Image (cartoon, grey):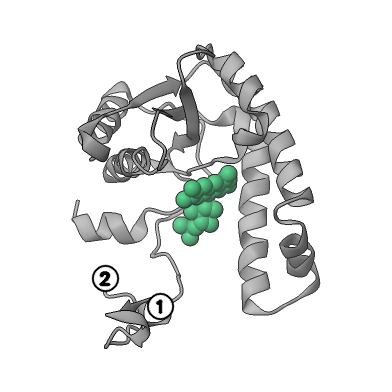
C-alpha cells in the first residue's frame, strides 16, 4: 500500500473483530519492527505476542482496572469536562472515552496482543519506532491496532502473567492489541502543522499553513 496512506490512516483502532490474525501477518509485523532504528543500534528490545485466550482475559481484567484508575486520576478533570461540555474538544475526548470503554469491556475478545519491552534505554525513545513500524505493517495487511501504555498501573501483575524475568532490567513499554477492524480507516484529525511548528526560533511561524491534510 501507499506509504502516505498508511501514515495518514493508521489510527487507534480499538474496535476490532475476534477473528485470528494470521501467522504470516504476525511474522511481517515483527520483522518490520526489528528493522526500526534504535539508539546506537542497540536493539535493546524484546517483543512478546500473546494469543492465548486465558492470558488475554487475565490481561483484560488488569486493563479494565487500569482504565478505571486513569479516569479517576490522570484524566479526572478532562473526563468531567467532557461529560459536562458540548464544545468540539469535549466531544472529541468523549469519543475517545467511548472507544476506550469499548476496549475495556471487550478486551478479552482481542485475538492478538503485542507487548514491547526495552532494556537500559534511559531515553525511553528507542522502542517506539519499532512499535509504530509493527502497527504500520499490520495496517498494510488490513489489520488494526491501538497502542496502550495504561497497564503500567499494574506493571508487576502484567509481568507476572507474561512470565517476564524480574531481574534482567526489562521494562514494559506498551501493549498493542491487533485485529481486523469493525469500522473503516480514516485520516486522523489533528491540530494543524502551523499551530504546532516553528522555524529557526521558538515562536516564529514555520512559513506555511496547512488547513487540510495533504493526503490524499
Ligand atoms: C505513548 C502512547 C500511549 C498511549 N496509551 C494509550 C492507552 O493506555 N490506552 C488507550 O486506549 N490508548 C492509548 N494511546 C492511544 C491514543 O489515545 C491515540 O493514539 C490518540 O487518541 C489518537 O487517536 P487516533 O489516532 O485514533 O486519532 C496511546 C498512544 C501513545 C502514543
Residue 40: percent from left, percent from top = 22, 36
Describe residue 90's horizontal placement relative to residue 208 as left or right.
right
Number of residues whose C-alpha sits closer than 10 Å to that of mark 1, classed few (under 14), some (14–19) or many (20 or more): few
Residue under the image location 66 percent in, 71 percent down: 91
Describe residue 132's horizontal placement relative to residue 19 as left or right.
left
Residue under the image location 40 percent in, 43 percent down: 123
Find the distance from the CA under tag 1 to the CA under tag 2: 13 Å
| Residue 33 image-quadrant placement | top left
Residue at numbered disc 1: 192
Residue 108: percent from left, percent from top = 61, 28
**Which badge, 1 or 2, comes first in the chain's sequence?**
1
Front disc: 1 or 2:
1
Residue 119: percent from left, percent from top = 40, 26
Residue 14 appears in the rendering: no
Describe residue 141's horizontal placement relative to residue 179 as left or right.
left
In the foreground, 173 or 184: 173
Residue at numbered disc 2: 215
Amino acid at each position: 500500500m501507499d506509504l502516505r496512506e498508511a501514515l495518514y490512516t493508521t489510527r487507534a483502532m480499538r474496535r476490532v473483530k475476534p477473528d485470528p490474525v494470521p501467522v504470516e501477518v504476525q511474522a511481517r509485523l515483527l520483522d518490520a519492527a526489528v528493522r526500526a532504528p534504535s539508539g546506537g543500534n542497540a536493539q535493546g528490545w524484546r517483543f512478546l505476542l500473546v494469543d492465548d485466550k486465558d492470558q488475554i482475559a487475565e490481561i483484560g481484567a488488569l486493563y479494565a482496572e487500569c482504565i478505571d484508575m486513569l479516569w479517576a486520576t490522570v484524566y479526572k478533570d478532562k473526563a468531567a469536562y467532557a461529560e459536562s461540555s458540548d464544545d468540539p474538544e469535549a466531544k472529541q475526548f468523549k469519543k475517545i472515552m467511548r472507544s476506550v470503554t469499548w476496549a475495556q469491556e471487550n478486551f478479552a475478545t482481542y485475538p492478538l496482543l503485542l507487548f514491547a519491552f526495552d532494556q537500559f534505554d534511559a531515553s525511553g525513545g528507542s522502542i517506539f519506532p519499532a512499535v509504530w513500524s509493527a502497527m504500520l505493517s499490520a495496517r498494510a495487511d488490513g489489520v488494526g491496532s491501538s497502542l496502550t501504555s495504561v497497564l503500567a498501573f499494574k506493571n508487576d501483575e502484567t509481568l507476572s502473567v507474561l512470565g517476564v524475568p524480574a531481574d534482567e532490567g526489562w521494562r514494559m513499554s506498551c501493549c498493542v492489541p491487533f485485529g481486523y477492524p469493525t469500522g473503516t480507516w480514516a485520516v486522523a484529525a489533528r491540530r494543524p502543522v502551523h499551530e504546532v511548528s516553528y522555524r529557526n526560533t521558538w515562536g516564529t511561524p514555520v512559513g506555511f499553513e496547512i488547513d487540510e491534510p495533504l493526503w490524499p
